[in-house]
């Protein structure tokens, strides 16, 4: 069988505790975004749009939900005979087995999977970010520079640089130093958590790292520093465009609100770079005679009889008469009764909001309210910040 | 569960939707914001656990093929059974079959090879949500040779004039099939028949030079054969003219009519397009409207249906209209009682107003 | 989403140590059979031919190979949007995780998988047998009798009954007693390891069994006896046809040789009950001017210049001039040099047999020779029994 | 890697294979024991990492559609790109295009929508195993407007008479395209062209009323446009007549010719049929023969090709013959220099003998 030029490994293990109850039952990459998507739709769609047709999804936590969502991969055109998408949970082996102990360990434990395809390069992705990126252009750069590894970076404001992993480079873009959250950053080029490695190089370092007892088996903490120490050629590839970590409730809300800006930086209607997502196959949305809708994204299967203002409404949401949804994100299949007021909130999938409930704090700088576990019923009397 | 195979016979369906059927057959006409007419017929079959469906296509079937692909949207892209789109391409000089019997004859392998014992044949013009397994149970209990499906309508509309109506006795046995206005039992162009009996009737029809299987092979045989009538109680629309297309589209804006067609446990499936959610800007004003995904609405829309990817600029006013896929309406344009086919563009300030009983129709890809 | 009437769970965990080095790198269900197939093709094809479109494959050992072989399930028409085939290796959970400790434990650990489909019945299969069976007919019987569980049985010769799990039944076919390898069998109805359970009943017993400390969590040893003890309705469904356990080298060889009999009991050419198998997509076989072929099954991609007599030849095998293959099974991609003699042997995939090698013992009652690990090279001088 | 889209243009291919093309186009004719002619053209494209392929079909394309399905066998059943079978079904009264320009014109969306920068156009009659990425590299290096592919044959056989030949200068630039016997550089009906340039040429051809894109749009433009010649060195067969079909089939029995077409790293893919391995009984006697799966052979076969599921009874003798799918040869029948199309049955004791230069051909489903 032919080998693959580049295989992607998507680290989808994070439990995302900062997302609170949103990730109680689902892994972070499965969290909803943008009225229709899950976070993982972005890296997977990027792969298929970049012509990368072989993706391993490394998942630590509740593999069944991601397994079920990813299915045979047809959503992202990754239902390929040879290659395609494979979910790789921690598994048992003849010599034992167990949890992935770090990002590098997760790849190390799936050496056999990678060896099947005998790739020349391996693309390592994380499942925590919203962005559209042509990995193929990055691969061309990686091959063109003859790098052992290439790390995608983005310019961040200097004042925020101390929150990121910062790459210091020479004038050719070769990485000379890696500063994890530096107090005095020498550069504002932050790592996006997107790496391309030559497979032969990565394999060698993974094997060596696995032997090290005091290693945390992490790309950022162990593998990249080892490569730098050995003067391997690490190049920085500068990405320009929208890129957002949605690791907290606030940042998730913000990223959603970014879509409602005029001419949003992240264009979801681009026919040449579609973001694929599992389709719930529901009828078109219905906006009733009593409805008022402004500044909103609304998905299929919704029925709106009330007011929606500056909000994101996922599929299958019903909003009854005289209710107001403002500055909020309403996840799939939420049923909102009459005379409900929702402000600056994220309402989880399948929640039922009973008549007259008041949720969230309308004042501009207030904390974002996160409503409840999936499928909970929120009576008017119980509606408070959770 | 009994195994049923399905045939969607488009052979005698006339393409009466004016501009909408210049380039496509009626079964391929967009309907209901994101569907094509044929989606209802196919979804009815797959929701009834029919896993093998043949489509007898005759004319203008290209967009039908593009839409149906290999049946993936209905999980019909299978090794065993699946979806078979069968355009006319027969080259047998000894073939004496005519009319839709050409289809039955040249595609007899479909009937021969299926493991099903029963065949459901339907058209594409009766929009409904029917479970054929229920109809089959009644068919088997009745002991009939053929079971036809009908809807008792409250009132005969123009589209029902052209449809066949049924006279039925107390045991739901069909006593006559006619075009009279005396009966409101509208035959829905659907019948259930045992495979072997269908095979037998086809052979007979061909030998006798018939050209219309239902009229010559079934209707004409009354009262010699036992035809049972199965009553369908759900939502129903017959679309066989521009006027009925327009009026029945508007019916979808009635929540009750809507719910009778679209059900969670028997969904209407269609090809996936991967559009983003629809976007409403600060200037948008939308009421009593069905909106498919991928739209960007800055203007005023009421009592209308917007298909996928429609763009309506600020200041534009749309009333009682059906705007199909990827149309763009520029600022301050006014559309009332209008149907725009796909990919039309209406420029700034343009006003188009049709009559409620005769909408103004614009063929696809027009810029005005 | 609609529920599924019946979901199949295929126990593919066995390492099959009695098959010696054939199962050194692959699970027993992945072992080759019949010139083209792997053992697991039979139960999977039976499922799809029986209209059962949702199958969980429980695998303990080296999941990657089965994962790779099963892929998206398109081989068996099981690449369904909802349902289809899922490989279920032992996985890690928030509360721990680990190896499946028994056949019942394997199902118990995948309760969530089953609950997704909310089935009325669960079909439990094993991956060790060669047979063609309409599970739908068995399901009809199971539903018709209103049984809590139905066990498929086959009549075995009385003298061999002490080697099987024997079902004693009343005149209606209700199972009154289960004798594992009885010294004095009261019946010759042997369990085929094919069960159908009502899911509500099975679930209850699995939950109870999981709590029992001294249980071996096995269907035959624990679940079935518990059901019998509680007077649950267990019915025996009698199967007629070819059924063969291929758990040893001898029985695997025999089952292959059965295919060469005149009008073999197991018809692989039946168009209405196809056995699906992953296709290597090779050109048609070529039988050269120097070849002699009699009483053989030969697959695509083979090139035969020598003599093949009463043998099964898998795809991609080359047999050079003046070599003789007799009473043997040659697995895929084996290359056989010139002047080689092979008698009563099974040669593993990818082996290379060098010119002049002599393998196996032609005398009729001799032990079957198993040649070597996958991909080994056998020089003439080394050719002995292994 | 550069992105290429593929077009398989069957528009001007004549169906010259007598009985074998009564009911199917040449591209759908079975070849080589388990393939159809078109499998080679499609596999060449997918092996060159072309992920978007259009097939311009004109006549008798039904069995082609059955065979290709949605391209699953080639992993071309994709959301983006994939396989498009495009039979003629155009209904635009304003369309002035003619000949194969009708295909280019009415399917211009395929060219518009592809993300590829280059288009490879091929027919189905040149059986070969070519990598278009290599050809594209040479095309780019040469700076040519169009690159055509040719094979230098050792000797001109009858099938080469009808093919175009190329005159080439020292830089591999084409100086003439003709039907002369003076050149052995056989043009393989394959060319590579930049997408935008193709688009430009199509528009020009239509405006000038041309009806054959290659002859009118490319060949006639010599020497004004730069046409580069790419030499293909591998196995090659041109099948455009019954005689060439028969002779080139026999060539597959030569191990060297065989290996030049069938390569592990560039396999010829075809629709999967799930046949069992072929079965040879104690009475079988087979030599120098290609045997597809699912055959049951009890008789004598030499110097022949057996397709899938052929049954040859005891005592039957087959020589120098091609027996297609599911044929059954009863005991003691004798066939020599015979081609049986699919599903034929030759009854006990029957003898059919053709000439080596003109095989005896039996159309499909015949019982003799």
Image (spheres, coloured by chain):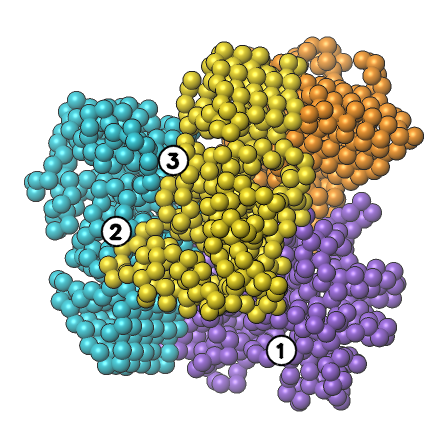
Chain colours: A purple, B cyan, C orange, D yellow
Which quadrant holds the N terminus of chain D?
A: bottom right
- The subunit carrying tag 3 is D
Q: CA distance from mark 3 to mark 2?
A: 29 Å
Return the residue at label 1. A239
Indicate the secondary structure of the residue bearing disc 3: loop
The answer to whether marks 1 and 2 sit on the same chain is no
Q: Which residue is mark 3?
A: D23
Q: Is residue B260 visible?
A: no
Determine whether label 3 and label 2 are within 8 Å by CB: no
Name the residue rendered at 33%, 27% in the picture: B195
Residue C52 tag number? none
The location of residue C169, given as percent across then percent down, is 60, 16
Same chain, marks 3 and 2?
no
Give me the chain letter of mark 2. B
**Helix, strand or loop status at disc 2:** helix
Distance from Cα at disc 1 to Cα at disc 2: 48 Å
Q: Nearer the viewer, mark 3 or mark 1?
A: 3
Q: Is residue D37 above or below residue D142?
A: above
Which residue appears at 49% of the width and 51% of the height?
D180
Q: Is residue D358 above or below residue A24?
A: above
Q: Which mark is residue B26?
A: 2
Q: In front: D250, or C140?
A: D250
């Amino acid at each position: 069988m032919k080998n693959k030029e580049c295989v992607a490994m998507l680290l989808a293990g994070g439990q995302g505790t900062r997302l609170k109850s949103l990730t109680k039952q689902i892994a972070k990459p499965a969290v909803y975004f943008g009225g229709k998507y899950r976070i993982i739709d972005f890296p997977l769609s990027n792969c298929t749009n970049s012509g990368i047709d072989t993706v391993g999804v490394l998942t630590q936590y509740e593999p069944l939900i991601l397994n079920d969502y990813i299915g045979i991969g047809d959503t992202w055109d990754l239902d390929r005979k040879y290659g395609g998408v494979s979910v790789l949970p921690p598994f048992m082996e003849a010599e034992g087995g167990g949890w992935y102990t770090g990002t590098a360990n997760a790849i190390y434990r799936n050496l056999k999977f990678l060896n099947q395809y005998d790739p020349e390069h391996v693309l390592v992705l994380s499942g925590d970010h919203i962005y559209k990126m042509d990995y193929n252009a990055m691969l061309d750069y990686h091959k063109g520079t003859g790098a052992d590894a290439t790390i995608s970076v983005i310019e961040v404001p200097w004042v925020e640089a101390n929150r990121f992993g910062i790459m210091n480079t020479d004038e050719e873009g070769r990485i000379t130093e890696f500063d994890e959250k530096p107090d005095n950053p020498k550069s504002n080029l932050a790592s996006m958590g997107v790496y391309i490695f030559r497979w032969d190089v990565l394999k060698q370092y993974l094997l060596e790292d696995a032997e090290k007892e005091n290693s945390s088996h992490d790309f950022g903490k162990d593998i990249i520093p080892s490569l730098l120490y050995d003067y391997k050629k690490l190049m920085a590839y500068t990405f320009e465009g929208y890129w957002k970590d949605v690791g907290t409730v606030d940042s998730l809300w913000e990223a959603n609100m970014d879509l409602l800006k005029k001419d949003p930086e992240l264009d979801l209607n681009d026919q040449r770079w579609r973001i694929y997502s599992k389709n719930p196959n529901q009828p078109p949305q219905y906006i009733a005679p009593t409805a008022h809708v402004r500044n909103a994204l609304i998905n299929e299967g919704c029925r709106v009889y009330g007011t929606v203002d500056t909000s994101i409404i996922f599929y299958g949401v019903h909003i009854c008469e005289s209710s107001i949804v403002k500055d909020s994100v309403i996840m799939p299949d939420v049923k909102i009764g009459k005379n409900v007021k929702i402000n600056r909130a994220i309402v989880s999938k399948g929640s039922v909001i009973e008549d007259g409930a008041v949720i969230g704090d309308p004042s501009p700088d207030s904390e974002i309210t996160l409503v409840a576990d999936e499928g909970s019923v929120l009576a008017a009397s119980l509606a408070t910040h959770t | 569960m009994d195994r049923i195979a399905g045939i969607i016979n488009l052979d005698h369906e006339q393409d009466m939707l004016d501009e909408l059927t210049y380039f496509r057959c009626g079964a391929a006409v967009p309907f209901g914001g994101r569907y094509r007419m044929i989606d209802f017929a196919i979804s009815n079959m797959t929701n009834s656990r029919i896993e093998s469906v043949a489509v007898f296509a005759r004319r203008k079937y290209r967009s039908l093929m593009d839409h149906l692909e290999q049946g993936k949207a209905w999980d019909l892209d299978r090794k065993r059974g699946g979806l078979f789109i069968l355009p006319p391409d027969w080259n047998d000089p000894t073939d004496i079959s005519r009319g839709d019997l050409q289809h039955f004859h040249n595609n007899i392998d479909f009937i021969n090879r299926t493991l099903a014992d029963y065949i459901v044949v339907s058209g594409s013009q009766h929009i409904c949500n029917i479970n054929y397994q229920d109809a089959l149970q009644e068919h088997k209990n009745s002991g009939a040779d053929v079971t036809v499906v009908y809807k008792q309508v409250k009132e005969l509309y123009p589209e029902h004039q052209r449809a066949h109506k049924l006279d039925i006795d107390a045991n739901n046995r069909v006593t006559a099939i006619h075009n009279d206005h005396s009966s409101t039992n509208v035959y829905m162009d659907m019948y259930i028949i045992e495979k072997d009996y269908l095979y037998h009737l086809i052979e007979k029809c061909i030998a006798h030079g018939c050209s219309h299987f239902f009229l010559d092979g079934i209707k004409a045989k009354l009262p010699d054969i036992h035809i049972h009538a199965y009553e369908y109680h759900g939502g129903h629309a017959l679309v066989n003219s521009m006027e009925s297309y327009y009026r029945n589209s508007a019916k979808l804006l009635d929540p009750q009519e809507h719910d009778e067609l679209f059900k969670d446990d028997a969904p209407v499936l269609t090809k996936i397009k991967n559009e983003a959610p629809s976007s409403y800007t600060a200037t948008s004003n939308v009421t009593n409207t069905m909106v498919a995904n991928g739209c960007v609405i800055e203007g005023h829309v009421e009592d209308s249906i917007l298909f996928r990817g429609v763009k309506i600029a600020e200041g534009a006013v749309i009333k009682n209209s059906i705007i199909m896929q990827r149309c763009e309406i520029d600022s301050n344009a006014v559309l009332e009682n209008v149907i725009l086919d796909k990919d039309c563009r209406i420029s700034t300030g343009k006003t188009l107003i049709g009559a409620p009983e005769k909408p103004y129709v614009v063929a696809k890809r027009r810029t005005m």
